[in-house]
Amino acid sequence: MRYPRLNRRLLATLACSSVVALAVAVSPALSQSIGAAGSVVVRLGYRAPASVVVPTGETTLLRLVNRAREAHHLAPLVMSKALRTVARRHSQEMALDGYIGHDSAEGQSFVARLSAAVRGWHAVGENVALAPTVAQAHQTLMRSPGHLRNILDPVFRRIGIGIATAGAAGYMITEDFAE
């Protein structure tokens, strides 16, 4: 797939896997150190001219995630409307602002974003990806130890999936997890 005006670092990553993905998970005790882990932001050098949410992709990804959990004898994750809203906003923001990362464009951590949607949490996690297709994103996340750990974490019971179009680059995907 051709990626318009993406920076060299990102282009090299895309050439290897055609997917860019980042993962992070924390518990309240670790939230003070999240800045170091969650502040990874990759500037794309490309902004989507427009971005819309893709509900059918979200349903497909939920099905794929729950199949993986079932294969490991884990309970399926339930889609949370609140987490989905946060995930959708983040995916669209990343696509329109031309970056991929756990922090918002204003520097707000994913923990701060999720704290507004999840009260009294003990553990939260987030996977983000930019991929040409939802299936490719899921395959890449499943091959990455950090992403797989979030997907298969038995503590997590709820998920919010936000998939937004990212122009010629494909889809910006956010998976937000909570217990």
Image (cartoon, rainbow, N blue to C red):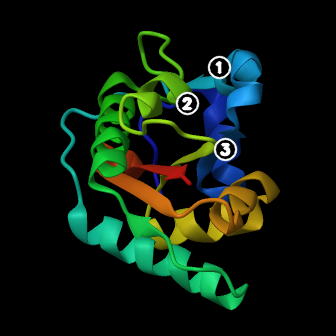
Instruction: Note whether 79 is above or below 160 in the view shown.
Output: below
Seen from the viewer's position, the closer of residues 171 and 62 is: 62
Mark 1 = which residue? 39
User: How far is disc 3 from disc 1 in space, using C-alphas?
Assistant: 11 Å
x and y, in percent, of residue 1 in the image: 47, 58
**Quadrant of the image containing the C terminus:** bottom right
Check contact, mark 2 vs mark 1: CB within 8 A.
yes
Q: Residue at (64%, 29%) from the top-left corner?
A: 8
Q: Residue at x 40, y 26 (%)?
A: 98
Residue located farthest toward the right when viewing the structure as drawn: 145
Q: Residue 165 versus residue 15: which sits nearer the camera?
A: 165
Visible residue check, residue 69: yes
* Residue on which the image places disc 2: 102
Question: What amino acid is found at the position of numbered circle 1 in the picture?
Answer: Ser
Mark 2: amino acid: His
Residue, disc 3: 23
SS for dot 2: loop
- Label 2 or label 1, whichever comes before in sequence order: 1
Q: Is residue 80 left or right of residue 137?
A: left
Instruction: Give left or right: position of 29 versus 93.
Output: right
Mark 3 / mark 2, whichever is N-terminal: 3
Please determine whether, in this image, residue 53 is positioned above or below residue 69: above
Q: Position of residue 51 (x, y in %)?
A: 21, 41
Q: Position of residue 122 (x, y in %)?
A: 63, 41
Q: How many marks?
A: 3
Dot 2 alpha-carbon crowd within 10 angstroms: few under 14, some 14 to 19, many 20 or more: many
